[in-house]
Amino acid sequence: MFNLIKMDLHRLVRTAAVWIILAFAVGAAVFSVVMTDSDIQLMKEEAQTAAEESEQRTIGIYVFADPKWADGTIEAGSVISAELRSGLLSILCVIFTAIFAGAEQKNGYIKNIAGLFPRRGNLAAAKGIVMSIWVLVMMLVFAAAAAAAGILLWGKEFYLESAAEFLKFLGAQYIFHLELSMLILLFSMLTRSTAFSMTAGILICSGILVPLYSFINKAVHDFRPQWEFDINCFVPDGNITMMGLDTAADLMRKSVLTGAVFTVILVLLSMLILQKRDIKQ
C-alpha cells in the first residue's frame, strides 16, 4: 500500500493539470473576494442591505454578501465561509478528481500493474488517500488566497473573530469536499469515463439535484410531519452549501459524522469495483 501511495504522489506532483487547477483555485478565491467587495460597495452606494441568505438551497453558483459587511466590519471567517459554500472550490475538486482518477483508466499504468496485485482494490484506496491530501492542500490554498485578497481590499476592517471556530468550520468543509471527491472517484470507477464523472460532478455542484432534494423532503414531511428531516444534511453538495459558521453545533456534528461515514463507504465501493472487474487492455 505504501508503494502505491508513493506512485500516486509521484504522478500527482508531475501532472501539469493538477497544478493548473490549483492555480485556478487561487484565481477563483481572489476573483470571488473582489466580486464580494463590489457587492459591498454597491450596498453602501445604494444605502440598502442585500437580501438575507435563504435557508433553502438555490440552483447555481452564488456568493451571498452579508448585509453587515456594508457597515465597515468584515469578519474573515464569514467571508471565507461564503466563498467555500458558493461551490467554486467544490467544482475544482470535481475537475481534479475526474482528471486524476480517470486519466489511467484507459492509458495509465493501471493496465500494466493491476494484474500484479492480488488485492488490486488497494489501487483505489491509495488513490483516495492521495486525493485526500490534495483536497486539503486545495482548501488551505483557497482559504489563504481569499484571506490575502481580503486583507489587501479591506485592511483593518478585515478581522478574524475566532480562530478556533473557523478551524472547526474549515475541518467540516474539508470532510464534505472530500466526500464529494470520493463520489467522483466512484463515478470514475463505475463508468471509466472522465467526461461523465466531471460533467455529473459539476452539475451536482451547480445544484441540478435541488428540485429532487426538495421533492424528497416534501414527501418525507407529508409521510411523517414530526420528523425533522432534510436530505441536504446527507449529501456532500448539500452540506457544502448549507453548513456555515453559524450552523448549530449538533447539526454540524451530525453532518460531519455522516460525511465521514459516507466517505469511507464510497472508497470501499470503489475498491470493490476495481477488485472485481476486468482491466481492459
Image (tube, helix red, strand yellow):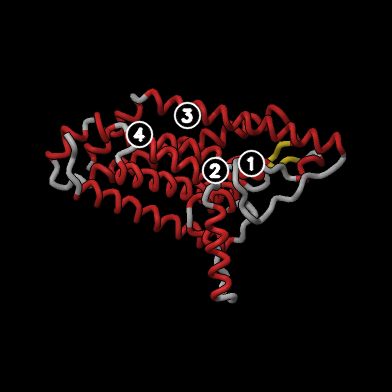
Q: Which residue is mark 1?
A: 62
Crowdedness near tag 1: few (<14), some (14–19) or many (≥20) residues, C-alpha within 10 Å: some
Contact between labelled residues 1 and 2, with CB atoms less than 8 Å apart: no
For badge 2, the amino acid type reads Ser
Marks 2 and 3, Cα distance to the nearest angstrom?
A: 20 Å
Marks 1 and 4, Cα distance to the nearest angstrom?
A: 27 Å
Which of the two labelled residues, at mark 3 and mark 1, occupies the earlier sequence position? 3
Which of the two labelled residues, at mark 2 and mark 4, occupies the earlier sequence position? 4
Which of the two labelled residues, at mark 2 and mark 3, occupies the earlier sequence position? 3
Q: Which mark is residue 22?
A: 3
Marks 3 and 4, Cα distance to the nearest angstrom?
A: 13 Å
* Residue name at image x 25 percent, y 49 percent: 273
For badge 4, the amino acid type reads Phe
Which of the two labelled residues, at mark 1 and mark 4, occupies the earlier sequence position? 1
Contact between labelled residues 4 and 1, with CB atoms less than 8 Å apart: no
Residue nearest the observer in this picture, 218 or 47: 218
Which of the two labelled residues, at mark 3 and mark 4, occupies the earlier sequence position? 3
Q: Which residue is mark 2?
A: 206
Q: Is residue 184 above or below residue 31?
A: below
Which of the two labelled residues, at mark 2 and mark 1, occupies the earlier sequence position? 1
For badge 1, the amino acid type reads Tyr
Crowdedness near tag 4: few (<14), some (14–19) or many (≥20) residues, C-alpha within 10 Å: many
- Indicate the quadrant where residue 69 lies: top right
* Residue name at image x 34 percent, y 39 percent: 130
For badge 3, the amino acid type reads Leu
For the C terminus, give its image quadrant.
top left
Nearest-to-viewer mark from 2 and 3: 2
Marks 2 and 1, Cα distance to the nearest angstrom?
A: 9 Å
- Element type at mark 2: loop
Give percent across and percent down for residue 62. 64, 41
For the N terminus, give its image quadrant.
top left
Left or right: where 66 falls relative to 12: right
